[in-house]
Image (cartoon, helix red, strand yellow):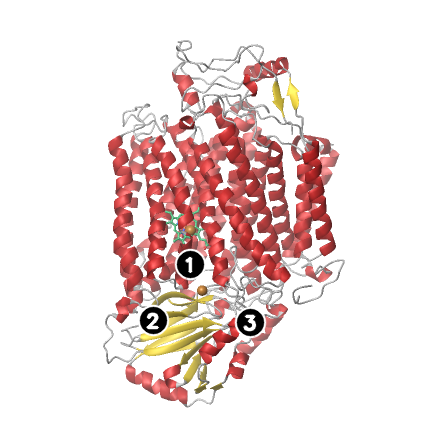
Amino acid sequence: MFTRKWQPLRWVRYVALAPLLLLLNGCATHSIWWIFDPHGVGAKASFDYMMIDVAVMLGIVGLTAIMIVWFMWRYHKGRNRGTYDGKWAHSTTIEVFVWGIPILAVGFLSWAVAINGSFAVNPYNPTVITRHLKPHGDPIEVDVIATDWQWLFIYPQYHMAVANELVVPAHTPVFFKLTSTAVTTDFFVPQLLGMIDVMPGMRTKDALESDSIGQYQGVAADYCGAGTSWMLFKTHVVSKSDFASWVHHAQQSTGNLTVAGFNRFAEPYININNKVEYFSQVQKGLFNQVILEVMHGRKWPLPMFMTENMVGYLKKQAAEHRA
Amino acid sequence: MLVNLPGPWNPWLGRLALSEIPYTNPILAPLFVVVVVLGLLMVAGITYYGKWGYLWKEWLTTVDHKKLGIMYIILGLVMLFRGFIDGLMMRTQQAMAVGPHASGMMGAVHGYLTPFHFGQIYSAHGMIMILLAATPLLVGIMNIVIPLQIGARDMAYPYLNALGLWITAAAVVLIMASLFVGDFAHNGWFGYAPIFELAYSPGVGVDYWIWTFQLVALGTTLGSINFIATIVKMRAPGMKWSRLPMFTWASLSANIIALTSFPCLQVAIGLVAADRYLGTHFFTAGFGGNLMLYTNLFWLWGHPEVYFVILPAFGMISEIIPTFSEKPLFGYVTMVLATFAIAGVSWLVWLHHFFTMGMGPYVSTEFSVATMLVGIPTGVKVFNWAFTMYRGRLTYTAAMYWALGALFLLLVGGLTGMMLSIPAINYMVHNSVFVVAHFHMMLLCIVYAIFGSVIYWFPKVFGYTLNEAWGKVMFWLFSAGTALVFIPMFMEGFMGMTRRLDWPFDPHWAPYLNIQVLGILVYVLSILAFVVMLYVSIRDRAQHRAAADAWGTSRSLEWLTASPVPFYNFAVVPQVNARDEVAWRREHGLSAQRASHYDAIHMPNNTGIAIIIGGLTFVLGFALTWRIWWLSLISLLAIIVMMIYRSAKGDPGHVIPAEEVERMDREAERTMPRADLPRHSGGVLGGAIAYDSGAAGEGSANLRGAPDYRP
Ligand code: HEM
Ligand SMILES: [Cu+2]
Ligand SMILES: [Cu+2]
């Protein structure tokens, strides 16, 4: 029934394997592999846990794959490589291994990466950062408010804020409190710290520490409407002295953020031209005020034209972009 | 109106207006014309050949589980294609839009799709692929195979079966309607709170999503009740639990999951509907609403759902590999245990879909470990399939190709799943295309298993085998497409590319996105190969007539009856003597054994009520979406009236006289080729009963396993 008279396009099977070649050039360049090139204490820890997990799992999965391929080759009908035993369907020894190996692996991973890792990079209290806190160290606090579709970073210690750009000093723990005005999204700087949800009417926390001065891309990692893709912010890790002068510079700006001003800022806006804004004065307690207002039913509704047919709106934005 | 509806509304048409039809859209308008022309051609063709009566009598009103299964599969394949087109658009958009300098057209800043349009496409893609392609395909195969595997005449509730199909079809029509009338949801197949609230999604898109979801959930729940009842109550004599074929076991566990989890989804989506229609605050950010509650309720269904779709696929692999290894499945008992272990643990892991909500290390650890526990029985299954091949005699048929391909995809999906289940790692790749690649490995594992089983069971249903060579060509093209699309996607995940970007901002991603477009083109070739396979197979069907045991090495009960299966499944209900009954009979020289005594068969009657109710549920969904209250009310009342009418009327069924059964069975016997197998010469072994002929005069033995259709 299965005579092989004609096998059209035999070669296509090799095409299937071709993409594997791509893996060879992996890791050659420096910074496009953000997850493999962590520069934050938390991101580094996550990377290490990933390597342990992958090593264990690849050990099992890889060997299983080899075993399967070997069986496929050896027991190919008509090739007479292995002996056929059409009755053999049970072996207690094998069953013990079959259950034992996954159980051991999962047991080990549970302890080594699941439990340890959950505490090490717990966003609310990442021990990889907090256990090194010197009593006289002075962490930076940043209150993050996500709007539709911009990021506002308030530095309460310095009474100033900046939109769509985050600047933090190196070698210093930074503690974030986060919320959102309208809808849920995720705060994420791939090379520095993992994702944390930002939710309207709620407050989450995260922490960051980096030893490498540089510029890193921050994103809104969860879909939150039409402006998601443009909801980007550059994160600059700078030296402590540069940070001080940056703060000073920001404090000279004319921007001023009251609650009313904030409510205007939080109107739906797609940040196509990557606008960065500084605010030298920020009303005290703005962060809590926003959460409270949302809890009491404040919304920033989307107009129809920002959902159904965005063509006109985007044209306007694009023109603004070119100007 | 209880809520503040943006935009116009009038009592007759609700929110419906001519402007809701996107006749100026350069993609949708031509597509609409094509659909209409194709539809008209079909109608004209059917009319010309005078096939309306045939269509109505043989298909639209049927309650035959095989025909319903075939229609489920056709529905699933059509939606698989629609979902693929969505995928094609997403891939081309991202490839065209990548980087800050990519040009834009048709109103988009970059690429050719505006953000909102892109959102609708991936939302529809996800919803269609999981609920309207994979699920109907699996339900269709279960429908065809389960009654045959357990020796039943039909499902326990044939009418309910038809109802499930037509309600699912209504969901399909509803989601297709959203293409041409109004919009679909933009916030992902699983929806996010509170973006799906009226304030942030003022259009009808989310409403389409709600009612499509409710309809498929209803259809699938009805189906699951039916499958469970069938497997529990309708097994042929001798089909003990310890002899149940693996696919039936897997389907049983899957349907228990479905029955217990889909209601949870319906409640969650129902509450979303309450928020949007009645102005409640279940999932709003303010007024005491709890948006995380939605996420919990959704994934409380969502995770079991992914096992609802993978378990039957595991069952299919467990049927194909033993057949082409010429050996029983290794570790049957362990395999059953593993199946139920997976089903059970799948209830305890839902939080792994949102580790990033900041739940604290104790809760995350708990769910992380629970998730990894699923890896244990899954690993056991893989090992057991491997040891089924060990000491076997492997024939590499096209079906076997697909089953083995599924195995390798499962390995990749399992490896990446074990990465995602660890919070420390999850924080870095959650919501990235790495997750997308993970679950596509798993869902493609299902698709591979489905293609494998379509090839495997095709001869049982249609009486001839599909073309092997083209099946293999399709396999290799499809696999090349899979590799070209998803290996770069995994890599992009490590580059930190998040999912659902209508504009991938980093130009470094460009080469990888381009490779994916190439992969999509290879997928297109594989679809062509599929069409050619069908064409060639149908053309050459006379040369490829299948015997009852189409593969010569099959094992389970469905291979005992004639190919193609007669509408009554088994002329005489078989007596089951062993776990792999057909293999057992072959080994004991009983393959040629035929019944000597026939009895009358009692079968259910066709009914048009199921399709009418299905149509009405579509009208209800459409009317609710557009807030046309009078129409909603009328269609709801009509559904209730139809249900009462059917219950009151009942179905006495009809009886096929014994002589007629005998005639048909002999005829099938005559036209079917004999499997060219070495036959043992021995007769019936001591004590073995091939057919339960029943005590004379009672005549009921053959009806054992057949339900009483009387009300
Ligand atoms: C060893 C078994 C598996 C493990 C450990 C596992 C683990 C996970 C985890 C942790 C996530 C959440 C990722 C995230 O959003 O951050 C996930 C997502 C997902 N998994 Fe799996 N998984 C497994 C098997 C499966 C199977 C069998 C399927 C389905 C057929 C599946 C389908 C999905 C889907 C659809 C999603 C994402 C849904 C979405 O966000 O749209 N997984 N998996
Ligand atoms: Cu929350
Ligand atoms: Cu899950």
Q: Residue at x 74, y 54 (%)?
A: B630
Disc 3 marks which residue? A297
Q: Residue at x 55, y 76 (%)?
A: A267
Which quarter of the picture shows residue A232?
Answer: bottom left
For the residues marked 1 and 3, what is the alpha-carbon distance in whole angstroms? 25 Å
Amino acid carrying label 1: it is Phe
Q: Is residue B340 left or right of residue B110?
A: left
Q: Position of residue A35 (x, y in %)?
A: 33, 62
Q: Position of residue A250 (x, y in %)?
A: 40, 86
Which quarter of the picture shows residue B385?
Answer: top left
Chain under callout 1: B
Chain under callout 2: A
For the residues marked 3 and 2, what is the alpha-carbon distance in whole angstroms? 29 Å
Q: Quadrant of ligand 2?
A: bottom left
Indicate the secondary structure of the residue bearing disc 3: loop
Disc 1 marks which residue? B354
Indicate the secondary structure of the residue bearing disc 1: helix
Q: Residue furthest right?
A: B12
Badge 2 crowding class, 10 Å Cα cut-off, few under 14, some 14 to 19, many 20 or more, is many
Cβ atoms under marks 1 and 3 closer than 8 Å: no
Disc 2 marks which residue? A207
Amino acid carrying label 2: it is Ala
Which quarter of the picture shows residue B377?
Answer: top left
Q: Position of residue B75 (x, y in %)?
A: 59, 41
Above or below, comparing residue A41 to residue B229 in the picture: below
Label 1 CB less than 8 angstroms from ligand 1: yes
Cβ atoms under marks 3 and 2 closer than 8 Å: no
User: Which mark lies nearer to you, 1 or 3?
Assistant: 3
For the residues marked 2 and 1, what is the alpha-carbon distance in whole angstroms? 19 Å
Please tell me which residue lies in front, A186 or A139: A139
